[in-house]
Image: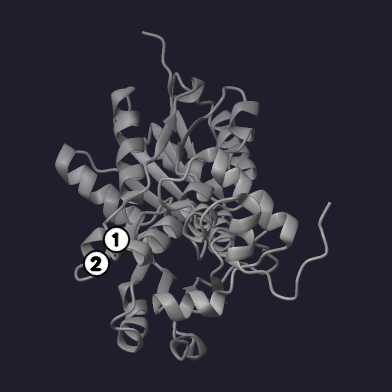
Amino acid sequence: MREDRPKSVTIKDVAKRAHVAPATASKALRGVGNVGPSLVAAVKQAAMDLGYRPDLSARALRSGRLGIVAVAIPQMPEGSEFRNAPGFWERSIHTLLHEFLRADFCTIVTPRIGAEQLMKVPCDALVVLTNDPNDLAMPLGHHPNTPLLVIGLDPDDAAGLDTVVDGNYFGGGSAVVRAALEHAVENGAARPAIIAANEPLLPLKLLAKAATRWGDENGISPVVATTNDFFQTTLELVEQGCDAFIVFGDDAQPVLQAVVGAMAAADKRIPEDVLVAANSSGGHATALSPSITTFGRHGNELGRLAADWVLLGLETGVFPPTALPHYLVQRESTTRSS
């Protein structure tokens, strides 16, 4: 039960309650230093009992930081919500904002990279989600000495930037493309195809660029197609002789149903005649028959990684290059009996 608290509870009050030094209490609440788990628990309980809240203004004065992170995001599809949307980027952004909130940072979000309002805001760090290097001219011009985290930029376009965190398709999302193509060829494909939804959040040029690079290195020319009609496009690619289909689409269930339906209409068996793999982490991949091989990256992990990069960098002054590992789960749709 919370006790009546004084007008202003300080870290000294918390330390006294937990029977530790103020410095130890501060470290325990900030999650830094070598403070044992039992002491951390005791300090947090004392803070909760007393209703302690950190004085962010005082912290900012001591550290020279403002406690503000500015986040510029792409225009989200109409009706999307950070908290409940199923899409990769919505999950990434929601987790990113949640992690900043947990660290007592105020986050200012704008849906447009070049929003003039964002450029006027002093901040400790700037996070930009984009796959277009031209979007960085204004942030770099207005915040030349502010740590800049770019999520989604191809590494080739990242020269001069502190770091790039790869997203699901972005940047080293090229690693995802390469892994999917290699998996298809290793399992018997001779002419793989990448089908991507024609959506604003998908960096279609980067998908094509990554596929072309991989093809040049391996002497294979993968087909890259964008579409709003996965059923019809799949039929056309089957007619062109494609024998593996690597699918990128944020709304995975109807996309996979369309691709699988097109194979049935073309009288092609999965995996005997064609292979299918999809960028998906949803249960619909296992609900289909045959079950669909999936690949990609986890949006929540990307959000946490990006927040850690900013928060640890501000604490230590070191902002190392980093990338998010990808996953590939092989299922029936790419497993051929020997």
Q: Is residue 219 above or below residue 12?
A: above
Q: Between residue 64 and residue 296, name the one nearer to us.
A: 64
Query: Quick check: 240 left or right of 117?
Result: left
Q: Between residue 246 and residue 240, name the one nearer to us.
A: 246
Q: Is residue 89 above or below residue 288?
A: below
Q: Residue at x 43, y 50 (%)?
A: 168
Q: Which structural element holds mark 2?
A: helix
Q: Is residue 54 above or below residue 194?
A: below
Asked if residue 67 shows in the view, the reply is no
Question: Furthest residue to the top?
Answer: 338
Q: Residue at x 56, y 46 (%)?
A: 40
Q: Which mark is residue 154?
A: 1
- Looking at the rendered image, the quarter that the C terminus falls into is top left
Return the residue at label 2: 157
Residue 60 percent location from the top left of the image: 47, 78
Q: Residue at x 22, y 43 (%)?
A: 215
Residue 251 percent location from the top left of the image: 61, 49
